């Protein structure tokens, strides 16, 4: 009997088969159990012999089942691991992954560079009152500069007595808003979207500027030049000469347009070498009327401001010739310049 069942246990090929064997031998109606039940009908002498033998058999078979079960479980696990093994030589599934847009990338770089120079980041609304966008910046209603800005005006129904609003044409209104709210001295940049009705290879109706504003007791044009040169060196990764050309903005006096050194050798634009010049920004000493409009005492404080195109910086840094492509969301274009996987 023992041989029969130990053989059956060893022969069980999987855990289900083993369980069948166990039930057949040790289950309620199993052969061994039935034999034990039959003990009751035996004479005491017979029982004395058969009893302990059957008990020992039961224990042995139970142990054998446990041992076999452990072996089978181990084998099953090994088989599963084998079957589920990862084939690292299989080609991966293609992944689609977002990436940073060149405008965002350049904005972040500009913020980081000016942060090192002690500049905080300020923001203002894109839908702006004509007072902040123009009047406070010394551009009164009849000023020709208003026409030059190709302004988008917000529609107003007759009887609407809210002040006229425009899509801001530059980031300069943030100068006023910041000084009104936080006072001076101050050192901020204000990056953001601006809008002008203009469209060609280098103009889109929405584009990005970064405004700079530094006001203190004795902040000068020399500080402006140093700051900009420091910025361009960090941004382009090399020393870049600047050229200040006298200009006019209603909100600065004196005003200067700033060019950076470049070369066009072989048709390729290179920044920071050669003896050509490329205009990159407008700047100047903040006009006393602008300080006064922001409740700052122009007798006590002075400083500089500048505004430059972020998209234009990106075009120069990455050699992207057409601004319109910036806003087409074309992955092939982004990939071409290494901005998407
Ligand atoms: N706001 C000007 C423009 O958009 C740039 C500028 C900013 C000029 C600050 C001077 C000072 O053209």
Image: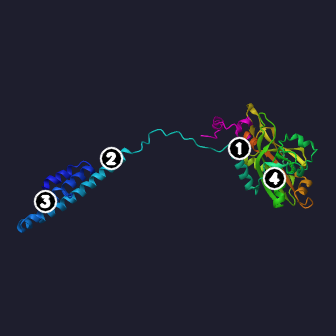
**Residue at the (89%, 40%) spot, across then down:** 147
For mark 4, give the secondary structure: helix
Q: Secondary structure at mark 3?
A: helix
Contact check, label 3 and label 1, Cβ < 8 Å:
no
* Mark 4 vs mark 1, CA separation in Å: 20 Å
Q: Which mark is residue 103?
A: 1
Q: Give the left or right position of residue 278, taking residue 73 as reference.
A: right
Give the mark nearer the N terminus: 2 vs 1.
2
- Toward the right, the furthest residue is 142
Q: Earlier in the sequence, mark 2 or mark 3?
A: 3
Q: Please state if 60 lies on the left or on the right of 219 as rendered.
A: left
Mark 4 vs mark 3, foreground winner is 3
Q: Which residue is mark 4?
A: 174
Give the structural element (helix, strand or loop) at label 1. helix
Q: Sequence-wise, which precedes: disc 4 or disc 3? A: 3
Q: CA distance from mark 2 to mark 1?
A: 54 Å
Which residues make up the magenta segment?
A: 316-341
Q: Position of residue 83 (x, y in %)?
A: 36, 44
Tell me the residue that label 2 is attached to: 79
Secondary element type, mark 2: helix
Image x and y of residue 35, in percent: 13, 59
Tell which residue pokes out farthest to the top in this image. 266
Q: Are marks 2 and 1 in contact (CB under 8 Å)?
A: no
- Asked whether 318 falls inside the magenta stretch, the response is yes
């Amino acid at each position: 009997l023992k041989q029969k069942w130990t053989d059956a246990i060893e022969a069980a090929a999987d855990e289900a088969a083993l369980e069948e064997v166990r039930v057949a031998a040790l289950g309620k109606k199993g052969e061994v159990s039935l034999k034990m039940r039959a003990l009751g009908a035996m004479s005491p002498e017979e029982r004395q012999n058969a009893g302990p033998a059957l008990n020992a058999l039961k224990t042995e078979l139970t142990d054998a089942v446990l041992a076999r079960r452990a072996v089978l479980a181990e084998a099953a696990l090994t088989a599963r691991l084998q079957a589920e093994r990862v084939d690292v030589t299989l080609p991966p599934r293609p992944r689609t992954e977002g990436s940073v847009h060149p405008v965002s990338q350049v904005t972040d770089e500009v913020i980081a560079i000016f942060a090192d120079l002690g500049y905080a980041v300020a923001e203002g609304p894109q839908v702006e009152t004509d007072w902040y966008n123009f009047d406070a910046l010394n551009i009164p209603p009849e000023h020709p500069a208003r026409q030059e800005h190709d302004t988008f005006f917000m529609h107003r129904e007759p009887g609407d007595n809210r002040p006229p609003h425009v899509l801001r044409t530059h980031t300069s209104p943030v100068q006023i808003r910041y000084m009104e709210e936080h006072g001076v001295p101050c050192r901020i940049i204000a990056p953001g979207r601006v809008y002008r009705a203009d469209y060609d290879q280098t103009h889109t109706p929405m584009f990005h500027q970064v405004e700079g504003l530094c006001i203190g007791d004795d902040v000068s044009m020399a500080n402006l030049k140093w700051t900009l040169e420091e910025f361009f060196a960090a941004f382009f990764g090399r020393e870049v000469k600047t050229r200040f050309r006298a200009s006019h903005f209603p909100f600065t006096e004196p005003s200067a347009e700033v060019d950076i050194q470049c070369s066009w050798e072989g048709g390729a634009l290179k920044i920071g070498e050669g003896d050509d010049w490329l205009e990159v920004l407008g700047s100047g000493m903040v006009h006393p009327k602008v300080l006064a409009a922001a409740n700052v005492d122009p007798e006590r404080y002075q400083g500089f401001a500048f505004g430059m195109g972020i998209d234009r910086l990106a075009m120069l840094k990455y050699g992207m010739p057409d601004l319109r492509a910036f806003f087409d969301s074309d992955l092939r274009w982004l990939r071409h310049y290494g901005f998407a996987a």
